[in-house]
Image: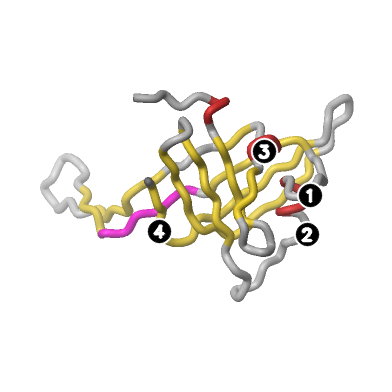
Amino acid sequence: MAKSVPSGIKIEYDNAGGTLVDITQYVQSINGFQMESVVEEVHTFGDSWEEYLPVGIGKLAPIEIEGLWDDTADGLVDLMGGRVPETPTTNTRTLKITWAGTKTSSVETILQTFETNPERNSLTRCRVVLQPYGTITET
């Protein structure tokens, strides 16, 4: 059984042509894949504790990616910059993460936020928020 470590993670994202490109070297932090079941509150009068039932819908929290501002071809700025606002007809783009070189998680995404963060006495950073769209595929 392999353990996932930072050096074993690979992060890929679709370019404008729909081809996955490796963006690992541009990513310094990612908030991860937070999956959850949507639940409905179902407790009744007389209950002293809350009760919930799943409604059969899952969701993935928005994914935040951060790295240094770098306009290299197929880097974060090249792939994400200049795309806001997107329209309802804009194609989704795949985000794929490989854990420990063997297991993968992938999902279609919509670009929600692209942020450039300059600071005095620091390198300029960029931050991206991707809104997951549809089913998560895990292998």
Residue 115 coordinates in the image, percent (x, y): 74, 47
The magenta region covers 56-61
- The amino acid type, in three-letter code, at marker 1 is Ala
* Membership of 60 in magenta stretch: yes
**Can you identify the residue that label 3 sits on?**
66
Q: Secondary structure at mark 3?
A: strand
Q: Earlier in the sequence, mark 2 or mark 1?
A: 1
Q: Earlier in the sequence, mark 4 or mark 3?
A: 3
**Can you identify the residue that label 1 sits on?**
73
Residue 31 coordinates in the image, percent (x, y): 54, 37
Q: Earlier in the sequence, mark 4 or mark 1?
A: 1
- The amino acid type, in three-letter code, at marker 3 is Glu
User: Residue at image x 60%, y 74%?
Assistant: 88
- Residue 80 vertical position relative to residue 70 in the rendered view, above or below: below
Q: Give how far apart the Cα atoms at labels 2 and 1 are.
A: 14 Å
Badge 4: how crowded within 10 Å, few (<14), some, or many (20+)? few
* Membership of 121 in magenta stretch: no
**Can you identify the residue that label 4 sits on?**
135
Left or right, 24 with respect to 133, comes to right
* Magenta segment main secondary structure: strand
Q: Secondary structure at mark 1?
A: loop
- The amino acid type, in three-letter code, at marker 4 is Thr
Q: Nearer the viewer, residue 8 or 38?
A: 8
Q: Give how far apart the Cα atoms at labels 4 and 1 are.
A: 29 Å
Tell me the quarter of the image containing the N terminus: top left
Point out the frontmost of discs 4 and 3: 4
Badge 2: how crowded within 10 Å, few (<14), some, or many (20+)? few
Left or right, 55 with respect to 77, comes to left
Q: Give how far apart the Cα atoms at labels 4 and 2 are.
A: 27 Å
Q: Are marks 1 and 3 in contact (CB under 8 Å)?
A: no
